[in-house]
Amino acid sequence: MSTDRTVELANELGAKVTQRAFDGYARQRNAGLHQINYKHPWVLILDADEIVPEALRIEMETFVSSAPEGVVACRIRRRDFFMGRWLKHAQMSPFFVRLVMPNRVRYEREVNEVLIADGEIVDLKNPFDHFPFSKGITHWVDKHNRYSSMEAQELVRQRAAHKPSLKSALFERDFNNRRVAQKAIFYRMPLRPLVKWLFLVIAKRAFLDGKPGMTYARLMMIYEYLIDLKAKEIESS
């Protein structure tokens, strides 16, 4: 349940607030999609540290007013900001499915959830903005320490349950499915933290984002290292 003034402020602005005890990220999002009677057929999924610019708002309104038949979701580019700068190069995954028909989509995976759509997904042109460090570096580190524990459990489960597919990782047309296949391969790589840093700095050219980009690359390397350490602890217990 919310512990700050979010509910109070939302009610003051005329929003209808629904609360639910937290029991997992995917289950929480699925409850939000499937257990609420929405006024409109399309829903925008937005986190508290994300903002919709005016250009995207107009584009979404135009799209939903005449959405093609068979299209059930839209993929939107996200711009991450750190130290006052857009991480144009250092960002890992810039596209996210956020504008959806709630009865035609569902979330899977308990951390860094993946949205599965029962129908076609199309891309919108304008981005939304994400400020993951808006509450400070300590908040980000605390959150990713929790995430690393869940990722470690998922890593151990994935290693046991799924065989990696290079074909799917390279050529799968659906972005979310391709990302899952890439993670399955990444989970089996030696020196994963170093691989992550090299990927961000060299392949993604994080250095072009200056100090924010290089700092972010180091933070993500530490995050992967925590996942590895915790996974080894689980496997040895």
Image (tube, grey):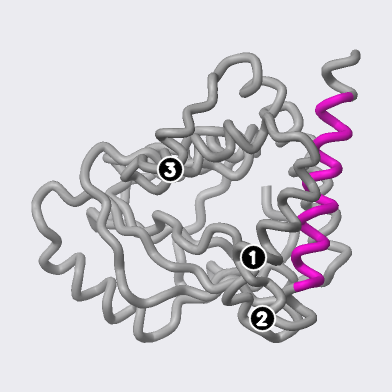
Provide the residue designation for mark 3.
170
Does dot 2 land on a helix, a strand or a loop?
helix
CA–CA distance in space, label 1 to label 2? 36 Å
Most foreground residue, 211 or 21: 211
Is 158 placed above or below 139 here? above
Task: Please report the bounds of the magenta region as a residue range.
Answer: 214-232
Q: Which residue is mark 1?
A: 6
Q: Mark 3 touching mark 1, by CB under 8 A?
A: no
Query: What amino acid does circle 3 point to?
Result: Leu
For residue 140: magenta?
A: no
Q: Position of residue 220 (x, y in %)?
A: 76, 56
Instruction: Name the dominant secondary structure of the magenta segment.
Output: helix
The three-letter code of the residue at mark 1 reads Thr
Q: Local crowd at mark 3 within 10 Å, few (<14), some, or many (≥20)?
A: few
Give the structural element (helix, strand or loop) at label 3.
helix
Quadrant in the rendering for residue 49: bottom right
Residue wearing tag 2: 208
* Viewer-side label of 3, 1: 3
* Residue 143 relative to residue 166: left or right: right
Q: Is residue 183 left or right of residue 128?
A: right
Q: Residue at x 22, y 47 (%)?
A: 120
Q: Residue at x 75, y 57 (%)?
A: 197
Closer to the chain start, of discs 3 and 1, is 1
Up/down of 199 relative to 119, above or below: below
Question: Where's residue 208, x and y in %?
Answer: 66, 81
With 160 as the anchor, is 120 left or right in this view?
left
Q: Nearer the viewer, residue 26 or 149?
A: 149
| Position of the C terminus by quadrant | top right
